[in-house]
Amino acid sequence: MGFQTEFNSVCKFKSEQELFELLEYGRGKMVKKGFRVYPAGQKVIAYTPDNQAIAIVKILASIAEINFQGEEVTEVEMELVRKLTDEEARIQTALADELFFGAGK
């Protein structure tokens, strides 16, 4: 058992539904497996499940707990700051692929 620290610039959604709710309503949450630390108050780039940069979000809260199934999970509550322009999304996607997602290549 232990906490895993997330990169300060990455907030990757694994669920299309969680991402849709954030973009549609301006607020949302995502659930991640394991205990993770997301710094509240920080603005980060949000990525789709297929690693495409899509928006800037502000982390409101990060709650790590053991759920009723006995799994370690972290819920991250956030609000949408703004969607990225096409050019910003293209550049951030390319950078994240090199720095984070494509690191094993």
Image (cartoon, grey):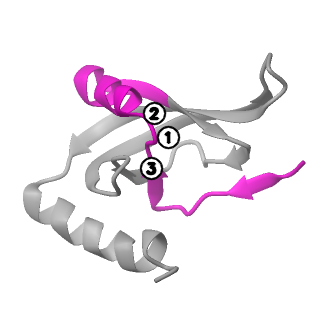
Question: Do labels 2 and 1 touch, CB within 8 Å?
Answer: yes
Mark closer to the chain start, 2 or 1: 1
The residue identified by callout 2 is 78
**Which residue type carries mark 3?**
Lys
Question: Do labels 3 and 2 touch, CB within 8 Å?
Answer: no
Q: Position of residue 22 (x, y in %)?
A: 33, 28
* Element marked by disc 1: strand
Mark closer to the chain start, 3 or 2: 3
Residue 59, label in figure: 1
Front-most of residues 96 and 44:
96
Q: Position of residue 19 (x, y in %)?
A: 35, 33
- Foreground disc of the pair 3, 2: 3
Q: Position of residue 97 (x, y in %)?
A: 36, 72
Asked if residue 23 lies in the magenta stretch, the reply is yes
Q: Which residues are magenta?
A: 1-29
Front-most of residues 66 and 82:
66
**Which residue type carries mark 2?**
Met
> Which residue appears at 33% of the width and 53% of the height?
50
Identify the image quadrant of residue 28.
Answer: top left
Spatial separation of the CA atoms under disc 3 and disc 2:
12 Å
> Which residue appears at 35% of the width and 33% of the height?
16
Front-most of residues 24 and 67:
67
The 10 Å Cα crowd at callout 1, few under 14, some 14 to 19, many 20 or more, is many
The residue identified by callout 3 is 12
Residue 93, label in figure: none
Asked if residue 24 lies in the magenta stretch, the reply is yes
**Which residue type carries mark 1?**
Ile
